[in-house]
Amino acid sequence: GESVGLHLPTLSVQEGDNSIINCAYSNSASDYFIWYKQESGKGPQFIIDIRSNMDKRQGQRVTVLLNKTVKHLSLQIAATQPGDSAVYFCAEIPNQAGTALIFGKGTTLSVSS
Amino acid sequence: DTGVSQNPRHKITKRGQNVTFRCDPISEHNRLYWYRQTLGQGPEFLTYFQNEAQLEKSRLLSDRFSAERPKGSFSTLEIQRTEQGDSAMYLCASSFGLVEFFGPGTRLTVL
C-alpha cells in the first residue's frame, strides 16, 4: 500500500550539532506534508508543514526540504538541544480531497549533552 | 489550556468489557479525527468528523468501534467487547485547515 516511511529508526547526535531526519514517500500525488514531534507519553506536536508546490520552508531552528523528483522529505534541526529528543514523524495527505494523515514509522532522535 | 483534551488519560480494562473515551477539540475547529497508535508505530487513522457528520471511516474501525460527535463539539469513541489487540494509544486531533492538532491521547490496556 501507499505509505510514508523514514530512512532511519534512530538518530543520535551531540548537543549543538545539526540534525537531519529523512522521510521517503511513495505517492507522487501527495499534496501536503507535515512534520510532527512526539515526546514520550504525549500526542504528536506540529513542527512545520510544506505544500507540494514548495521546495523549502523554514521555521524557528527547523527547515523542511521537499524533493518531489525522488519523493523525499527531510527535516533539519539546527543547534540540536536535549529538549529536541523525541520521535519525529512525517505525515502526508495523499490527495487534495482526502483529509486523513498517513504517518510513517518515525525516527527517534536522541541528543546527548 | 486551549488545546485538544482527552479523557481518561489511561484506561485498564478486562477483555470483553466496553470502554468509552472522550475528546474535546479546540473550540473553533470543525474537523475532528481519531487515530490509534501502537508502540513504535505512527498513528493510524480511524475516523473523521466534519461538524457532527462522520465523513470517513478506516477499515481498521471494526463493528465493535463506534464514534459520535452529537453536537459538533466533543466526540466519544466506544469500543465494545474489548480484545487484547485493542491495547493502544487512542489519539484525537482537531483542525480548521489542513494542520491537525493532537491531544495527549488515552492509553488503553486490555488484560
Image: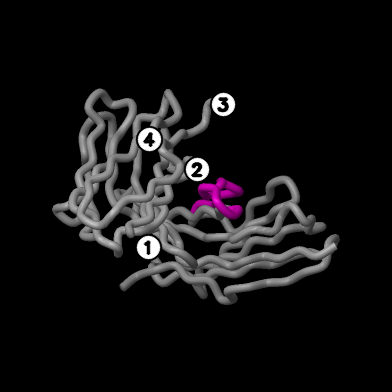
Give me the disc on residue B1. Answer: 3
Give the extent of the magenta segment. Answer: A38-51
Q: Amino acid at mark 1?
A: Ala
Picture layout, residue B69 above or below residue B55: above
Chain of residue at mark 4: B
Task: Identify the element where label 4 is drawn.
Answer: strand
Contact? badges 4 and 3 (CB < 8 Å): no
Chain of residue at mark 1: A
Chain of residue at mark 3: B
> Camera-side residue: A5 or A57?
A5
Q: How is the image coloured?
A: one colour
Q: Amino acid at mark 3?
A: Asp
Contact? badges 3 and 1 (CB < 8 Å): no
Q: Are marks 3 and 1 on the same chain?
A: no
Kindly report the distance in space between the C-alpha atoms of the residues bearing marks 2 and 4: 10 Å
Give me the disc on residue B104. Answer: 2
Residue A102 location in percent, x, y? 39, 59
Kindly report the distance in space between the C-alpha atoms of the residues bearing marks 3 and 1: 37 Å
Picture layout, residue A4 above or below residue A42: below
